[in-house]
Image (cartoon, grey):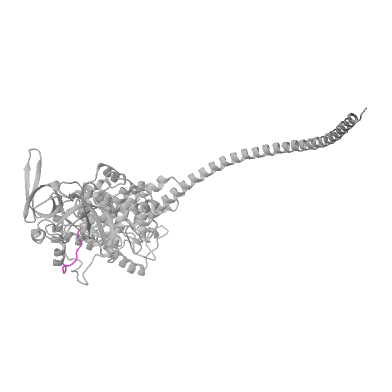
Amino acid sequence: MAAISLFPIGCKVEVSSDEEGFDGSWYVATVINIIKKKKSKKTMYEVNYDTLNKEVDTNEPLTEVVDPSFVRPVPPVGNYRDFEVNDVVDVYLRDGWWIGVVKKVIIIDNGDQKSRKYVVASFQDEVESEKSGLRFHREWVDSCWRLGLPPNKKNNEDTCVAKNKRKNVYQRENKENVHKKKEPSLNENIYELASILKSLTTRQQAHLHEIGFGCLIGFYIEHLPRKLQSLAVDRLDAVNCEMMVHGTLMKITKQDVHDILGFPMGIIQVKAVKKAGLGDTILVSMWKTRYPRFRNGVQRIHLSDVMQMITSQPEGGSNFKIDILVAIMTIMGEGKSNGVINQWFLGSVNNENDIKNMDWCGYVIECLRRSKENGSWNAGLLAFLVVWYAQKISKQQKETPAILHWTFEELKAIEQMECSEVNFVSNQERKDGEETHELIPLSVDQSDHVGFPGSSCFRPPDQHDEASGALNNDIMNQYQQVWPFVKQSAFWATIESLEFFRQPSQKPHFSPLKKVKVDHREGLAISCVVTFKNLVDKISKIQLTDPVDIINDSLETLVDLETHGFDVGAVRACLNEMLSLKDKVGQLRDLERKVEESKKCEQVEMNHLEVSVKKLQKEMEMKNEEVKKLQKEKVMKNEKVMKLQSNSHLLSKQILDCEHSFKKLTATSL
């Protein structure tokens, strides 16, 4: 049954039913409403079916309210291989998908091309279908897609047809194997990844190339030999990430990861932060908003949701790049057993353009170490480890990425060869006290060493030196057995006395020297040691102002030294930190230069403003003088107006007096 989870309105889902005659069928629908019952507090979904109508003669879609246990996401598209007899499949029938079993494969010869048709047994009926009408049966269990039973398993038809119930096809098999010992095995998610990578659109493939993982297009791996898996896991030394292969100690390097998986091997370190969400960048924070599922306040993004999101973005884009990166690193790196994605590395992703320049190979090696320590193996890591072990045993160097070119038959042949040469004992069967491969360091901590005559470190050995020297030589000879040459030069004593070669202890194996003439091997080995010593000394003299090519050249040299077994982790980390600081200083200097330019522009504008202010102040002074002058003239004018007003009043009085006298005269009789 589908896991109960929240599907948002508008989400495409598949819906089943417990009605008689519909067992084992799934119909595509769209969620149009989420109904929460108050009494039972249960969530129900109202859906519109895409292919079912209310009436036969109408186009109005059928609408139903369904229980969450009958709702699941739409399964990923694409089939990772052709169908075979006894495969558990879904066949498109009666406008929906019905569970069935492939009973017959019909090959049709069309001349230049051959096509296939399949006879599928479903509900006691046999139907004939093209490949486009079939898909591998998947069950939605614990928020994760699980494939049906693999080919040639017995009773598939009994399980899928006679019983005819929607049950996890893995349950019966798991019950039978519950008491068996747990061994590393492939999980079904790797098939989903292969299916998605195979069905990517042209735009999606282009964006996959842009982030540096384009070589995975066409990735497919069917099975891994169980004993070869266990043998490789058992022999892996988690601390140093190395393995004893036929008497030769070999280190798993980042170049190995690149050659086998094709992952980018950039200069930006990928750090795993175990607390998901801590230090997320803006890019990652925006990406996470598309997955609103939380549990106890922690965002839990399921791999199946990411897979579904990938298939829903045919045009690709920034979010698609993060989606496909998360899917790849969860399956091929570290993941969780409950179907939750690996978020630990996301804090290192600052920009989508930086993804191809990040050190994903180094991150895979860290995943190997943690998987060995925890005893929990992911499918992709197991596949890498088995192919690496096979390449070292067979000495075959296949085209990058090599994982695409190894077949199950080739790996099985190597497993048979290994198991015939050694007494194969798994981790679970190993008895206490059995001999194990112990890694003996090249250098031994000694207080005094014998050097060249005449050198500052030369002194005649005393009896104590002879006793301790004999013990040290025994230990050294044990480790020396894995070298492709006999140590004869007296220069080794001086080398082993140097501090850089003792802390941390260096354990080169010089395996690549097997390809050169025997007489040249010891000299080349010494030159490797001298190169490493000079490189360590050079780091202490690098200045911040030195060209970046010096650091890049040193990093390239480390890659070569690492293939000889040198522990270059600390040196590489130092150089990468230098590159990071130089880049940061360069950015800061660019910013400082821009600030200075802005400062000069602002200073010029400030000077112009100061001139304008002074000009205005001078004009204001002149205006103030004019104002004073006008005010004085105003006072004088006011006094004159007052005087004229007084004269006007006086004249008006005289006029009135004259008028009065005139009236008086006219009134007097003559």
Q: Residue furthest top?
A: 670
Which residue occupies the foreground of this view, 572 or 180? 180
Query: Which residue extends farthest front?
Result: 669
Q: Quadrant of the C terminus?
A: top right
Q: Does residue 334 show up?
A: no
Taking the spot 82% from the left edge, 35% from the top edge, the residue there is 645
State the image coordinates of residue 96 (x, y, percent, origin top left): 15, 51
Query: For this rendering, which residue is in front, 110 or 632?
Result: 632
- Between 630 and 382, which is closer to the camera in this rendering? 630
Write down the quadrant of residue 482 in the picture: bottom left
Which quadrant of the rendered structure holds the N terminus? bottom left
**Residue situated in front as seen by the camera: 186 or 10:** 10
Task: Quadrant for residue 457, please give it.
Answer: bottom left
- The x, y position of residue 394, in whole percent, is 18, 53
Indicate left or right for 203 with 457 as reference: left
Range drawn in magenta: 177-186
> Percent x, y for residue 593?
51, 43
The chief SS type of the magenta part is loop
The verdict on residue 183 being magenta is yes
